[in-house]
């Protein structure tokens, strides 16, 4: 039991003494480095930095981890890095998202100051005459390493945007060549690109190394900066910062910063400076709407235009197309309206002329009867005048005789004048005139005029089945012309019948909202195929007819929103022409 207790005591003492006697374990601190920058073995000896930091800060092992931009962002978000060395734009983005803090800034040997150390140089071949300014890059092939490289793209993209060339929107054809950045110049030399965007001083460094000749290239839109040893095409910005993670021990961050700031320049002249002001980087991010200003792409007018440019252009083209189509339709409609108005005017004028021709045609057909009508009063006047002359020669003239003869002459003159006035009224051209009057009056006048002009024709009977006062708003002279033509056709259809069998029957009635005038004859039966063509222009069964009468009558009926139809008379024989016209109502 004693031995067991002693053993336990020795073991406990050993466990207390062992940590004191053993050397302390080192803490590994990872430094994430953006792999785009070609620093390894060129400008800086990273092994020397690791050695200096380890010597100055015992107990820590500093491990450099090169990675691309997306992996660097993920590593910071997961808290896997103690420090970050990256380009200016990604630092601003990481500082905004994760709160990393810059503790030192790299100073290249050619830098004019910590604030003016890095930019872009836009190169083209020396013989190119068409590329002199940044605005000339529109439509050209532009070689770049990546669209998130600062000197190799972003700084130039901002300047080009100010010159009216939006690389992101496709104003130029981007040719991605990858790293190393000298591949962009190789693409230019091999005619795979018209322009190359590289970080400042790369062009001059390659020339010093004998890898290219300065005379073979020219800088597009050069912007010399006092104190800066190279020729940029853009304004200059602060170089890469070294930033500490948000949860980094402040004492350790301070020791790292002091160590870097106290290091002498490298063999190639690279050194460290106190943290630069990155306000110009924020302004670049705002103009390009990246990093902390990425939300401007969806919240600002310029961002929406930039983000949805293709869709907006498509929508604009659609709107322009619709507008052009609408304007074209309006022009065509207006032109068509004018043409239609002119056509209607011509059609109306032609209708007036045609109606006039139809009336003249009717008058031509009635010429012999009219001559007879005029011949009777003229013969009577001549007989009275000759009788008066004989009485005067024989001396048998008295006042009563002269008065009686004169009265008869005047009566016969008035009779002839009335016939002439009726003919003139029927024959003259006139404009259509709509008038409201009883329909029965119009029909009676048409029958009276027709009977007086053609007394030798069959008698006309009128059967009025309408209540008194039924009104019709129409051109009543045109309606009378239709009735005259229908009565004339009815008379012609019965011309071969005995006089006692000839009769024209007119029935005035109402069907629904229409007033109807039916003109019936007792002529021979008409074949159905003939009935189907009666209203066609120039179709006629008369040897001396024009074939226009019924066609004109039909057009007059339709012009009054009515219709003209024909059907066999029941009982046979004969035809019935029915003119239907809308009744006038007080609410119209």
Image (spheres, helix red, strand yellow):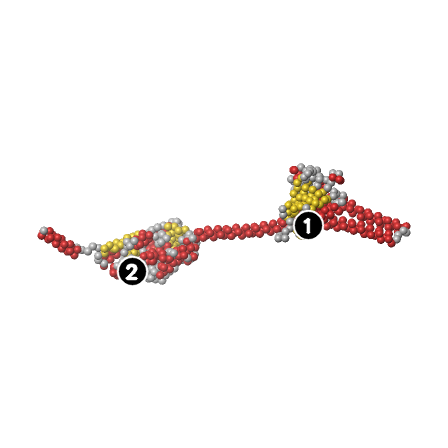
Residue positioned most to the left: 2
Secondary structure, mark 2, is strand
| Left or right: 279 as drawn, with respect to 414 | left
Along the line of sight, the residue nearer the viewer: 146 or 414: 414
In this rendering, the label closer to the viewer, 1 or 2? 1
Q: Is residue 384 above or below residue 221?
A: above
Instruction: Residue 254: name its quadrant.
Output: bottom left
Q: Could you tell me which residue is drawn at 36 percent across and 50 percent down?
A: 177
Q: Could you tell me which residue is drawn at 36 percent across and 57 percent down?
A: 292
Residue picked out by circle 2: 103
Please state the horizontal and vertical placement of residue 188, each as a whole percent of the image.
38, 51
Determine crowd level at label 2: few under 14, some 14-19, many 20+ residues with C-alpha closer than 10 A: many
Secondary structure, mark 1, is loop
Q: Is residue 510 visible?
A: yes
Q: Could you tell me which residue is drawn at 56 percent across and 50 percent down?
A: 332
Q: Could you say which disc has been placed on residue 468 in the image? A: 1
Residue positioned most to the right: 395
């Amino acid at each position: 039991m004693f031995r067991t207790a002693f053993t336990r005591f020795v073991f406990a003492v050993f466990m207390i003494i062992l940590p004191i006697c053993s050397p302390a374990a080192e803490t590994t601190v990872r430094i994430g480095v953006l792999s785009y920058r070609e620093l390894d073995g060129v400008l800086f000896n990273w092994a020397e930095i690791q050695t200096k930091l380890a010597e100055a800060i015992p107990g820590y092992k500093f491990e450099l981890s090169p990675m691309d931009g997306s992996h660097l962002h993920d590593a910071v978000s997961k808290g896997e890095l103690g420090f970050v060395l990256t380009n200016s734009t990604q630092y601003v983005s990481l500082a905004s998202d994760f709160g990393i803090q810059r503790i030192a800034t790299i100073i290249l040997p050619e830098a004019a100051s910590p604030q003016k150390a890095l930019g872009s140089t836009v190169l083209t071949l020396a013989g190119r005459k068409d590329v002199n300014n940044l605005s000339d890059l529109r439509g050209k092939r532009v070689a770049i390493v990546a669209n998130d490289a600062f000197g190799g793209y972003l700084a130039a993209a901002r300047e080009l945007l100010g010159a009216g060339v939006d690389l992101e929107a496709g104003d130029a054809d981007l040719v991605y060549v990858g790293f190393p950045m000298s591949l962009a110049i190789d693409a230019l030399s091999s005619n795979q690109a018209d322009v190359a965007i590289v970080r400042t001083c790369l062009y001059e460094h390659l020339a010093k190394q004998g890898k290219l000749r300065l005379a073979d290239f020219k800088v597009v839109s050069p912007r010399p900066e006092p104190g800066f040893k190279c020729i940029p095409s853009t304004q200059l910005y602060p170089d890469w910062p070294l930033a500490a993670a948000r949860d980094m021990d402040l004492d350790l961050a301070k020791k790292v910063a002091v160590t870097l700031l106290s290091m002498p320049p490298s063999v190639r002249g690279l050194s460290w400076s106190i943290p630069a002001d990155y306000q110009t980087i924020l302004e670049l991010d705002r103009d390009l709407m990246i990093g902390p200003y990425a939300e401007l792409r969806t919240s600002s007018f310029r961002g929406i235009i930039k983000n949805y440019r293709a869709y907006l252009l498509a929508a604009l083209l659609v709107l322009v197309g619709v507008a052009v189509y609408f304007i074209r339709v309006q022009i065509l409609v207006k032109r068509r309206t004018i043409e239609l108005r002119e056509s209607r005017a011509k059609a109306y004028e032609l209708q007036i002329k045609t109606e006039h021709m139809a009336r003249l045609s009717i008058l031509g057909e009635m010429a012999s009867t009219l001559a007879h009508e005029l011949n009777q009063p003229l013969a009577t006047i001549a007989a009275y005048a000759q009788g008066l002359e004989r009485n005067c020669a024989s001396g048998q003239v008295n006042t009563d005789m002269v008065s009686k003869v004169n009265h008869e002459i005047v009566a016969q003159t008035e009779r002839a004048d009335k016939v002439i006035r009726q003919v003139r009224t029927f024959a003259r051209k006139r404009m259509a005139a709509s008038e409201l009057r009883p329909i029965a009056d119009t029909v009676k006048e048409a029958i009276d005029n027709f009977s007086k002009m053609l007394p030798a024709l069959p008698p006309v009977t009128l059967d009025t089945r309408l209540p008194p006062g039924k009104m019709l708003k129409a051109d009543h002279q045109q309606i009378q012309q239709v009735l005259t033509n229908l009565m004339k056709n009815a008379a012609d259809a019965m011309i071969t019948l005995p006089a006692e069998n000839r009769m024209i029957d007119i029935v005035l009635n109402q069907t629904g909202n229409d007033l109807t005038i039916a003109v019936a004859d007792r002529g021979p039966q008409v074949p159905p195929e003939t009935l189907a063509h009666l209203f066609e222009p120039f179709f006629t069964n008369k040897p001396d007819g024009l074939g226009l009468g019924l066609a004109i009558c039909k057009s007059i009926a339709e012009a009054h929103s009515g219709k003209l139809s024909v059907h066999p008379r029941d009982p046979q024989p004969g035809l019935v022409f029915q003119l239907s016209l809308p009744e006038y109502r007080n609410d119209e």
